[in-house]
Amino acid sequence: MSLDRHVPDAEFAAAPAGARVRLATLVSAVLVLFGAVAVAFMMLRDPHVPRPMLAIVGVIPCSAIITWWTARIRRYRLAGDELLVELPFRTVKIPLAGLTSVAQDREAMRRAWKVYGNGGLGAYSGRFRNKRLGPFRAFLTDADHAVVLRWPDRCLVISPGQDYTFVETVRKRTGLAR
């Protein structure tokens, strides 16, 4: 397989947050806010706690918001011979060399176990494992738009908003057959 240098670079928005990501984000927000309010209430009832210490309770919700914001996937780009996954403070570069297949797969995250990473606060990102794919890396916001990229030694799951167009563009760029 050789990469077609004549295919222009392409940009794909991340799929809108799917139901599971929205639910995980909502549950996390409710738990964090409930916990912060409960701790603040207990601190207010204790006369020995200095009032400036209440500011520390605000750190918890702020850190959850920062975690959510930094976990969001902004977009995917195909540039040269790489797939770029753009997050707010970093870009993950994934070489396309050696790619053996690319396909839409709505069932990619089915029964996936998180090995390391973020399991739904803003996105699914990190390392996962399931029976069908084995170990894989994921950067996705909606499992219904999942695209699986396979190499001989690894697997990646992403969720571009225009999943069909993304698959066709990667196939054209890498010379993969349908």
Image (cartoon, grey):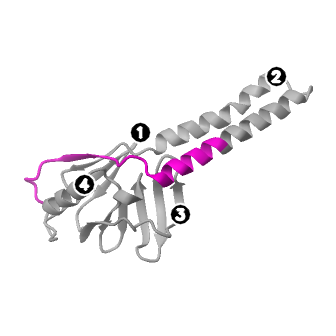
In the image, what residue occupies the spot 55% across and 51% down?
24
User: Where is residue 147 shown, x and y percent of the image?
Assistant: 32, 61
- Tell me which segment is drawn in magenta: 4-30
Q: What amino acid type should be assigned to the residue bearing mark 3?
A: Lys
Mark 4 or mark 1, which is nearer to you? 1
Q: Give the distance between the C-alpha atoms of the residues marked 4 and 2, in whole angstroms.
A: 53 Å
User: Where is residue 44 shown, x and y percent of the image?
Assistant: 85, 27
In the image, what residue occupies the spot 36% across and 69% down?
154
Q: Which mark is residue 82?
A: 4
Q: What amino acid type should be assigned to the residue bearing mark 1?
A: Pro
Q: Looking at the image, do the residues carrying marks 4 and 2 touch, with CB atoms under 8 Å apart?
A: no
In what element is the residue under mark 2? helix
Q: Looking at the image, do the residues carrying marks 1 and 3 touch, with CB atoms under 8 Å apart?
A: no
Q: Give the distance between the C-alpha atoms of the residues marked 4 and 1, in whole angstroms.
A: 19 Å
Question: Where is mark 2, residue-wise?
Answer: 51
Q: Earlier in the sequence, mark 1 or mark 3?
A: 1
Question: Where is mark 1, residue-wise?
Answer: 88
The residue most toward the front is 19
Question: Where is mark 3, residue-wise?
Answer: 114
